[in-house]
């Protein structure tokens, strides 16, 4: 009995330490939503919801720089990607109650919130929550100046075959210096984060931005030829750290704040 209590106490202390460490580190959290639609009319309802109701409500709640994106090639069907940054888990936990208490939001969001079951606003949406890397603690709005219709926002998801290797891939970005290469080569990163709730686990996600597709291709060509990248990718500690790369090319909507 004493042994069981001791083990439980150690586990509890370790959990509290981890939570306290995250709280002190001021890492942002990111909710990523991917809406799926059967029709263009559904997509219009959800776009109008974010443009006319949700974005302003999130901003009133203290949440800035919400990103709304279309998938450029629509390879997975008709989608809308939404990226919502939170300063803390507490802020994430309270946003639902804040939206419920926001009368202006409730009125403006009626077509979305009160959609009938015979004419739903979407087929479904999938949501994940990730925490920022320690070497890239907050979202950065890109400095691209080209028209939004021409920009390429590259959203990548890297899967690993185990939690240990997933953590190693995160280390590769931080201690290994992969983030530094992206910055040095001008990839204009928005965020880097490790998924803590969501599908396809374990994984990490990140977003980089470019003026256009040609610029994107040139940057990745330079990355592949970079001597520092070719050094760290062959280090034994990062061997098989990533097993699958899922890439999505996104275009920001005109009302997106990123």
Image: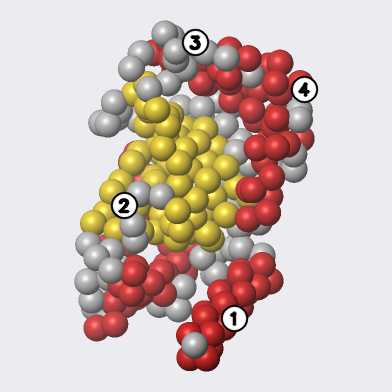
Badge 4 is on which residue? 103
Give the secondary structure at mark 1. Answer: helix
Count every numbered label the image shows and give the total.
4
Depicted 137 relative to depicted 4: above or below:
above
Badge 2 is on which residue? 200
Q: CA distance from mark 2 to mark 3?
A: 31 Å
Please give the name of the residue rendered at 35% of the width and 39% of the height, measured from the top-left corner: 249
Please give the name of the residue rendered at 65% of the width and 37% of the height, measured from the top-left corner: 96
The front one of 17 and 82 is 17
Of badges 2 and 1, nearer the viewer stands 1
The front one of 251 and 46 is 46
Image coords of residue 61 (percent x, y): 74, 39
Q: CA distance from mark 2 to mark 1?
A: 29 Å
Tell me which label, 1 or 4, sits earlier in the chain.
1
Please give the name of the residue rendered at 26% of the width and 54% of the height, measured from the top-left corner: 245
- Image marks 4 and 3: residues in contact by CB distance under 8 Å: no
Badge 1 is on which residue? 13
Q: Which mark is residue 51?
A: none
Depicted 136 relative to depicted 73: above or below:
below
Q: CA distance from mark 4 to mark 3?
A: 21 Å
Badge 3 is on which residue? 116
């Amino acid at each position: 009995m004493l042994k069981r209590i001791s083990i439980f106490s150690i586990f509890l202390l370790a959990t509290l330490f981890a939570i306290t460490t995250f709280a002190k580190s001021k890492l942002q959290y990111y909710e990523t939503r991917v809406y799926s639609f059967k029709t263009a009319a559904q997509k219009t309802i959800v776009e109008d919801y974010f443009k006319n109701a949700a974005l302003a409500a999130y901003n009133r709640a203290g949440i800035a720089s919400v990103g709304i994106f279309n998938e450029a090639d629509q390879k997975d069907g008709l989608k809308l990607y939404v990226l919502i940054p939170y300063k803390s888990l507490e802020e994430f936990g309270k946003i639902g109650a804040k939206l419920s208490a926001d009368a202006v939001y409730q009125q403006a969001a009626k077509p979305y919130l009160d959609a009938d079951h015979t004419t739903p606003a979407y087929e479904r949406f999938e949501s994940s929550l990730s925490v920022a890397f320690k070497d890239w603690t907050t979202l950065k709005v890109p400095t691209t100046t080209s028209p939004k219709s021409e920009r390429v926002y590259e959203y990548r998801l890297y899967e690993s075959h185990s939690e240990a290797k997933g953590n190693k891939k995160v280390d590769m970005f931080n201690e290994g210096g992969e983030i530094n290469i992206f910055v040095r080569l001008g990839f204009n990163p928005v965020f880097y984060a490790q998924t803590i709730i969501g599908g396809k686990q374990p994984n990490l996600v990140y977003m980089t931005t470019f003026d256009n597709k040609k610029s994107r291709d040139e940057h990745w060509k330079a990355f592949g030829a970079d001597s520092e990248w070719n050094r760290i990718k062959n280090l034994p500690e990062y061997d098989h750290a990533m097993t699958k790369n899922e890439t999505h090319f996104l275009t920001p909507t005109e009302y997106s704040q990123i």
